Amino acid sequence: MEISEFLALITKKEINRREYHTYGFQEKYKDMINIDNGYLNFFTNLNYDKKEIIIPTTNPNNRCGELRESTLYVVIHDTASGVETANAMSHSNWLMSMATNVNSTHSVSWHYTIDENGYINHLPLDAVGYHAGDGTSVKLEFTDTFIKASDSFKLEVSGDNYYVINGIKTNIKVPDYDNELKFPYLGINYKISSNNTYMLPTTYYNSTYKTICNKGGNLNSIGIETCVNKGSDYIRTMRICSDVVCDLLIKYNLNINDVKQHNSFSGKDCPMAIRHNGMWEEFINLVYVNYLSKTIFKDYKFKFESLDKEYLNNEGKVIKFENNHIVKYKICVNDKEYIFSSVMRG
């Protein structure tokens, strides 16, 4: 990839103002309307807090003390708590209160909570958490289908309940299911063998959500909760999350396809904000740009600067919206300067 192609992923002809929704489980915060004036991905300028408040192993319902055998996925959730105070620290306090109470029967823990100000790390990164809804009693294993991999992957179910890949029946039985059957939004987490054949994971049927789901959510992933508390900037939370995810992909030698939704492991409608606003692809693109900057372009020095600070700050966020207003900004790459402009629409 050339630097011009990379910059094209950051710059926009138009910066679009939009309405988006966040969702809380509380009736008062069930559907919250938010306005995003738009942003550009000035990734080097996104400064945020990084805290570590690790919960103890006092209550095994929250922290079992197991270490992961492997790290295969990063799983994105949102907290579904709309109360104004339900930020990262609030969730950290909630986790700590359960983890230190031996009488607590809640089985829940995850690795990071992220809000508009930054993140709090709750578990050692190699620890098993209880966040994905797929349990820990059944390990994730991949079975070779011996079907040659191709440019496309289409998974179906045969009349006698075997998986079918690209029209070819596999030797793998589908878990027993009720009359209703569906797959997660991102599908089944297949991988390619050394012989270039498709391998399918251990799957199970989640009867609550009527979905054939993947295993490996709790045992083989890092769980991230994003805050959706009323009045917070969820778009900034999402941007911070993309940077955290990028670093995890590099640390564990994962790729973009290894970023999953909670939905992948239980069928649950989570993360709701990203899913209901059609922002999953936007989020993955943020991760991808950050990933490129820290891998392919790791030896390049980037600097972003708004040339219209009344309207656009140096994080790339539109702070004053005016339809059809054109903002200019500068991107420095090593010793070269590039000037770009974008028009506001909305």
Image (cartoon, rainbow, N blue to C red):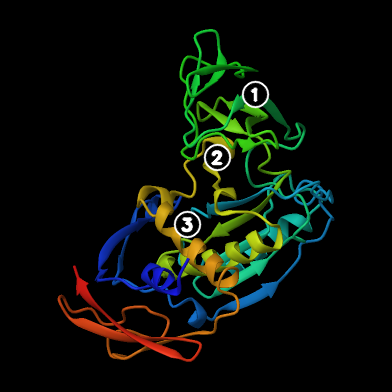
Residue 110 x/y as whole percent: 67, 54
Q: Helix, strand or loop at disc 1?
A: strand
Q: Which amino acid does label 2 sit on?
A: Ser
Q: Is residue 312 left or right of residue 87?
A: left
Residue 160 x/y as whole percent: 54, 8
Q: What residue type is labelled 3?
A: Ile
In front here: 35 or 76? 76
Q: Distance between the residues labelled 3 and 1?
A: 29 Å
Q: Is residue 334 left or right of residue 343?
A: right
Q: How far apart are marks 2 and 3 (CA)?
A: 15 Å
Which residue: 63% across, 43% down? 132
Residue matched to label 3:
284
Mark 2 vs 1: CB contact within 8 A: no
Q: Which amino acid does label 1 sit on?
A: Thr
Residue matched to label 1:
145
Which residue: 47% across, 29% down? 154
Mark 1 or mark 3, which is nearer the start of the sequence? 1
Residue matched to label 2:
264
Q: Which residue is at the far left?
A: 324
Q: Nearer the viewer, mark 2 or mark 3?
A: 3
Q: Helix, strand or loop at disc 2?
A: helix
Q: Distance between the residues labelled 2 and 1?
A: 21 Å
